[in-house]
Amino acid sequence: MGSENFGLWLFFIASLQFFIRTQCTIVGITYVREPSVKGAVCLDGSPPAYHLSEGLGAGVNNWLIQLEGGGWCSDVKTCVLRRDTRLGSSKAMATELAFSGLLSNQREFNPDFYNWNRIKIRYCDGSSFTGDVEAVDPATNLHFRGARIFRAVIDDLLAKGMKNAKNAIISGCSAGGLGSILHCDTFKSLLPPTTKVKCVSDAGYFVNVKDVSGARHIEEFFSDIVATHGSARNLPVQCTSKMKPELCFFPQNVIQLVRTPIFIVNAAYDSWQVRNILVPGVADPRHIWNDCKNDIKNCSSIQLETLQDFRDKFLNALNGFGHPSSRGLFIDSCYAHCQTEMQETWLRADSPEISNTPIAKAIGDWFFDRSVFQKIDCPYPCNPTCHNRIF
């Protein structure tokens, strides 16, 4: 390594360490070794896990739970590949995590929730916490128990004081954001009726649209997930009684059934959805979209038209969301995925804004009933505050 590159590397490491010291909190892991629900285990049979940063002062009876994201596994082959990683085994998880964004314990960076009990539930089931299959194939040792993990961790937290919660939020990013929608009402039902409960989904509003080749790739993928994990029994019966279970894995078909107040944070040009729903690899064998998917600034005029059409379909999928004051929307025009967990997009001087409002303020005002926030940004590239992903 040349001296110039080595100097840049040292600068990067120093900058990262400074960021962690000043904007993050390091939180240790807790394993649920004796779960309240029999068989609540990760894909490999290891115990569920979470990270808890305890609340202080006025926030000691307030709880904010974040469901970790990380995609899904849709069949035995992909679940075996996942089984021995951090997304399938608590044995492979880091024993410490850096909390920032909505999990930050610093008032400057998280003014409304900094002193709450803040928890990240680790994701090791591959089904957005919906799976429930009793049988275990000894050849693979795969356990499909996501729904049991969710209940076991919540029970563990209730025993640690959440049963006395005054305020509570269940949130999540990506696959965890989908989980926070699907488990929103269940979470509320497990808490005292006096607890103020609301839900937040970040980048979890996955839409059922055709890819650029005209195939319904994501619908087939979700169908395989639901079948493999036995998820149907943990999806809203009001939905599964009317349509195929895999369609009830899409928020657009269940959001109108959610009774608990909920806030949706999503990029209209969600980078994961563009890369995996609109233009999955199988739909672009000649890699025509690679440069565009890696950096939206590289998109051709024709590709931008396709992205604008995707945005239109995404907004149409929000039609069932409605506009009651109990619900919130922050749909920006960024090329991004998961914006509440990172400090730079949650609350910082240069964070993304809609109507001069960053995500942290929009959600805080909504939760504490200070004001209603239901905003949809203008089309790309109108918002100069966006932090667009570059891959």
Image (cartoon, rainbow, N blue to C red):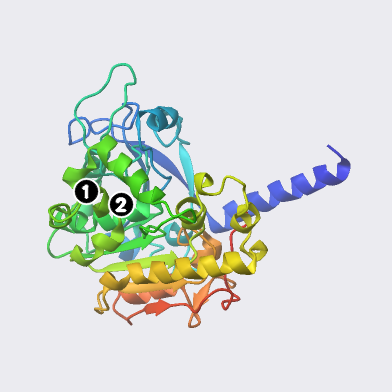
Q: Where does the image place residue 249, in percent across and percent down from the top left?
A: 28, 52
Q: Where does the image place residue 53, in percent across and percent down from the top left?
A: 39, 50
Give me the C-alpha separation between circle 2 and circle 1.
15 Å
Give the left or right position of residue 38, taking residue 198 as reference.
left
**Which is more toward the observer, 112 or 282?**
282
Q: Which residue matches tag 1? A: 245
Q: Secondary structure at mark 1?
A: helix
For the view shown, which residue lies furthest in the right direction?
3
**Which is more toward the observer, 233 or 63?**
233
On screen, 150 above or below 86? Answer: below
Q: Where does the image place residue 246, in percent across and percent down from the top left?
A: 26, 48
On screen, 142 above or below 361? Answer: above
Give the left or right position of residue 217, taking residue 288 as reference.
left
Q: Where does the image place residue 350, in percent across and percent down from the top left?
A: 59, 72
Q: Residues within 10 Å of mark 1 (few under 14, many from 20)?
A: many
Amino acid type indicated by mark 1: Pro
Quadrant of image for the N terminus: top right
Q: Which residue matches tag 2? A: 179
Point out the frontmost of discs 2 and 1.
1
On screen, 5 above or below 173? Answer: above
Q: Which image quadrant is residue 349 in?
A: bottom right
